Image (tube, grey):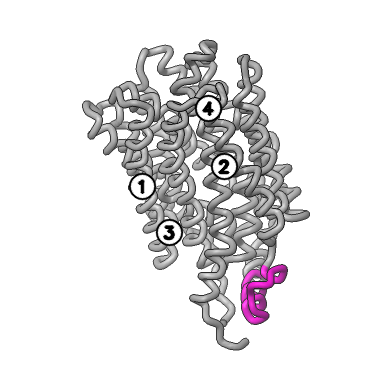
């Protein structure tokens, strides 16, 4: 094969694949968690939204997600990943608009359920189907980490935007209603762009040369063949595999902390600081920026060193410290510092984490297994907010909830290390889940 300019090829994929998926993820995250900011004012108009109702509504999102996660991933694996992602965006945009007009507890629960059902399988399709076709195993930590900076940027953008929208009123609507409607518009518009402009495979695009298409296609086929030669997984075999089940448990524990932190962080910081909603949004951008920087660094260092487990476990341990110490924050400055540690622990290793399953799973087995892992995380997404609501109602504060989340994050980190190490500290024979696949020469 003729020599290729791999730097040029990387830039092409950064702009044509990572950037569109990055924007999809930003819009998804803003629309998923805007209810946490809307809660700051909508309880004045909807007094039936008690802490218990809000916790249940925040969590029921993940019930819809759980039910449709695996079927959606299998549909995308069989037909088209990009068309499925476009469908996901369009339907969640419609549901987000409907959130602005809810008037009863039933409407709240129904919209949250439908939002989860609409978004189900988004990330598994990206991790297990789309990215493996466009990025080699060695490149995916960096690519996924860059894409997942969207989770943090969505807060850096979404928190101040929500603060401003909540304090304005147009067309006779309340600020929280505007928040839901205006933040749904990008999803509806970008779904159309994504449907027509982003493709499933290198051989479907015009912006790659024939040599570039051949290089990417041959690397993908070599990786798939090597992994299947090592162990060929069916969907059922993957669901029973101990490594897959361990990844499910790790992600469940991780996400209990993730969503318990996210859905209640604005409320806790507002109670502690007394800041206005607009200033609070600006303050929340500080820890999200810190976590974004660390996430990019971890993605690059993991790619350079080839290490995965210490990058993931180390970040989880940092998050455990931040969460467990949060009840002892005596000032806004200390609270923001601990939120920084928590945000780093929750976010920084996500990009590296999601490259682990696709290094020993392929095809529908990879799609279904990543969906199963994500579904177990989404159970944690239901447990976390409801656990925090129960703790607040039972004890009058959030302290116990933060201790529980910190413990779960710490245990999750230990389990990540067990991927590589035995309990006696020796390295496992199958320690590295990454299939050792030589990259096809350019």
Give the number of the disc on residue 325: none
Q: Where does residue 175 sit, x and y in percent of width and height?
A: 50, 25
- Residue that extends furthest to the front in the rendered view of this protein: 171
The mark closer to the camera, 1 or 4, is 4
Pointer 1 or 4: first along the chain: 4
**Which element carries disc 3, helix, strand or loop?**
helix
Q: Looking at the image, tell me whether mark 2 or mark 1 is earlier in sequence order.
A: 2
- Give residue 197's quadrant in the image: bottom right
* Sooner in the amino-acid sequence: mark 3 or mark 4: 4
Of residue 251 and residue 279, the one placed in the foreground of this image is 279
Numbered badge on residue 289? 1
Closer to the eye: label 2 or 3: 2
Q: Which mark is residue 299?
A: 3
The one nearer the camera, 118 or 77, is 118
For label 3, the crowd category at 10 Å Cα-Cα, with few meaning under 14, some 14 to 19 and many 20 or more, is: many
For this rendering, which residue is in front, 334 or 15?
Answer: 15
Up the image or down, 330 lies above or below 252; here it is above
Q: Which residue is mark 2?
A: 28
Most common SS among magenta residues: helix
Q: Position of residue 248 (x, y in %)?
A: 56, 42
Q: Calculate the distance from the C-alpha at mark 1 to the C-alpha at mark 4.
A: 31 Å
Q: Residue drawn at (37%, 31%), measured in percent from left and top?
A: 278
State yes or no: discs 1 and 4 in contact (Cβ < 8 Å): no
Q: Which residue is mark 4?
A: 170
- Of the image marks 3 and 1, the number of the one nearer the N terminus: 1
For the residue labelled by badge 1, is the local secondary structure a helix, a strand or a loop? helix
């Amino acid at each position: 094969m003729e020599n290729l300019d791999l730097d040029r090829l990387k830039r092409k994929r950064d702009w044509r694949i990572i950037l569109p998926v990055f924007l999809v993820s930003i819009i998804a995250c803003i629309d998923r968690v805007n209810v946490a900011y809307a809660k700051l004012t909508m309880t004045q108009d909807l007094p039936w939204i008690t802490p218990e109702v809000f916790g249940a509504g925040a969590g029921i999102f993940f019930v819809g997600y759980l039910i449709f996660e695996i079927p959606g991933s299998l549909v995308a694996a069989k037909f088209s990943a990009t068309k499925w992602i476009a469908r996901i965006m369009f339907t969640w945009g419609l549901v987000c608009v409907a959130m602005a007009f809810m008037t009863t507890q039933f409407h709240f629960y129904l919209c949250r359920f439908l939002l989860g059902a609409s978004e189900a399988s988004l990330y598994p399709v990206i991790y297990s189907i789309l990215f493996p076709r466009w990025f080699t195993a060695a490149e995916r930590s960096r690519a996924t980490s860059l894409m997942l900076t969207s989770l943090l940027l969505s807060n850096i953008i979404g928190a101040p935007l929500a603060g401003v929208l909540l304090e304005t009123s147009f067309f006779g609507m309340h600020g929280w209603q505007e928040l839901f409607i205006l933040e749904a518009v990008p999803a509806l518009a970008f779904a159309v762009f994504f449907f027509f402009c982003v493709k499933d495979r290198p051989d479907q695009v015009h912006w790659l040369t024939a040599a570039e298409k051949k290089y990417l296609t041959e690397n993908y086929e070599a990786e798939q063949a090597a992994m299947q030669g090592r162990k060929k997984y069916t969907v059922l075999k993957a669901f029973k595999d101990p490594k897959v089940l361990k990844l499910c448990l790790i992600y469940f524990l991780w996400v209990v902390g993730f969503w318990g932190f996210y859905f209640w962080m604005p409320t806790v910081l507002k109670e502690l600081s007394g800041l206005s909603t607009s200033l609070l949004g600006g303050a929340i951008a500080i820890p999200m920026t810190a976590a974004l920087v660390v996430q990019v660094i971890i993605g690059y260092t993991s790619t350079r060193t080839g290490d995965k487990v210490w990058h993931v476990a180390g970040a989880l341990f940092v998050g455990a410290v931040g969460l467990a110490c949060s009840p002892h924050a005596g000032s806004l400055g200390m609270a923001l510092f601990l939120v920084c540690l928590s945000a780093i622990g929750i976010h920084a290793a996500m990009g590296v984490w999601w490259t682990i399953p696709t290094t020993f799973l392929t095809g529908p087995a990879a799609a279904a297994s990543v969906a199963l892992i994500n579904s177990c995380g989404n159970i944690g997404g239901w447990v976390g907010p409801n656990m925090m609501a129960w703790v607040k109602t039972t004890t009058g504060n959030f302290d116990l909830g933060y201790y529980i989340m910190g413990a779960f994050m710490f245990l999750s980190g230990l389990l990540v290390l067990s991927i590589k190490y035995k309990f006696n500290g020796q390295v496992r024979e199958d320690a590295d889940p990454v299939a050792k696949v030589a990259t096809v020469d350019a």
